[in-house]
Image (cartoon, rainbow, N blue to C red):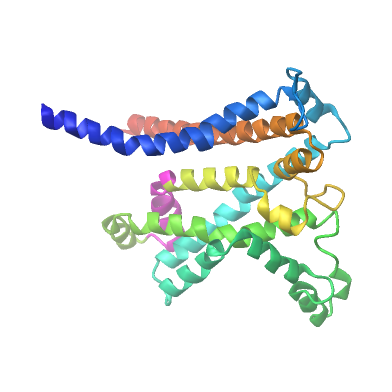
Amino acid sequence: MNKVRKNKLAVVVFILPAAFLFLGIIVIPIFLSGYYSMLDWDGISEGMFTGLKNYREIFTSPSIGFPKSVVNVLLLAFLSLVVQLPVSLLLAIVLANGVKGERFFLSVFFIPNLISTVVTGQLWMKIYNYEYGLLNLLLRALGLDSLTRIWLGDINTALGAVFVAQLWQYIGYNMLLLYAGIKSQSQDVKEAARIDGAGSVRMAFSIIIPQLKPVLEVCTIFAVVGSLKIFDLIYVLTDGGPVHASEVPSTLMVRMIFFRNRYGLGSAMAMFIIFICFFFAVLIRQLYRTKDKEEKHVRYHKK
């Protein structure tokens, strides 16, 4: 009995530091942001309680442009879902099949994720530079001068240019997770499928991908939520410009708090970012759970 009590005490002792950090870094700041979001406060003088006025203002005031930033970030999340994840999955499947130089390619694709986002932003600023950027130099070399442009300064291409940089940075991370998931699958099932004459495409869709659903769920949440709270890459590349073409809620929030001293309004934006990230994370989990239940129901009735 004493041994059990000692074990429980040890568990509590080891959990307490993490619990205090979780409370101090995540829980308490969220509650404080929720409180500040209901104040008209400049960060210095005494704040005045205004209720939900800040929330109404960020969605109704044309001068703020918050709805446009929400559309931009949802577009980034959608592109991450339909471009980043499929490409990561394709690369993971190809590498897991045992191509020559497998370990080398794994390292090469994962290196961008190890680089600081600020460095990544500076690198892509050089690539997109109109005068000496690699992209425009390549287009000129191919005789496609008409396609050259100021990629980060054009309202039609700024957001797409940011997404390409984001894709380059994070594609290796999802690929590595999916690769590890594929490698952990039973080889006996794959061998049996090959003996039955299953090709690479049939093998991928009928055996590999269905068994990857737990990893795919995690990757989907990471890709979508990561896009919804993106900040540093856009801040370095465009700072939300030109003319708010690449503005997202996080960059707008920073501008409101630190440049316009509207802490209440910025905190309302912060609470919206927290809500939308939480909402999509729960939604994705629920969709995967629902799909699993439907498939189990179908298999049960087939039996």
Q: Identify the main secondary structure in magenta.
A: helix
* Image location (x, y in percent) of residue 7: 19, 34
Front-lying residue, 105 or 115? 115
Front-lying residue, 256 or 163? 256
Residue 200, magenta (yes or no) = yes
Q: Quadrant of the N terminus?
A: top left
Front-lying residue, 115 or 109? 115
Q: Quadrant of the C terminus?
A: top left
Query: Quarter-wise, where is residue 257 in the image?
Result: top right
**In the visual, does 19 lie left or right of 9?**
right
Front-lying residue, 260 or 180? 260
* Image location (x, y in percent) of residue 95: 44, 67
Residue 38, magenta (yes or no) = no
Identify the residue at image location x=83%, y=71%. 130
* Image location (x, y in percent) of residue 192: 28, 58
Identify the residue at image location x=50%, y=55%. 174
What are the residue bounds of the magenta stretch?
198-214
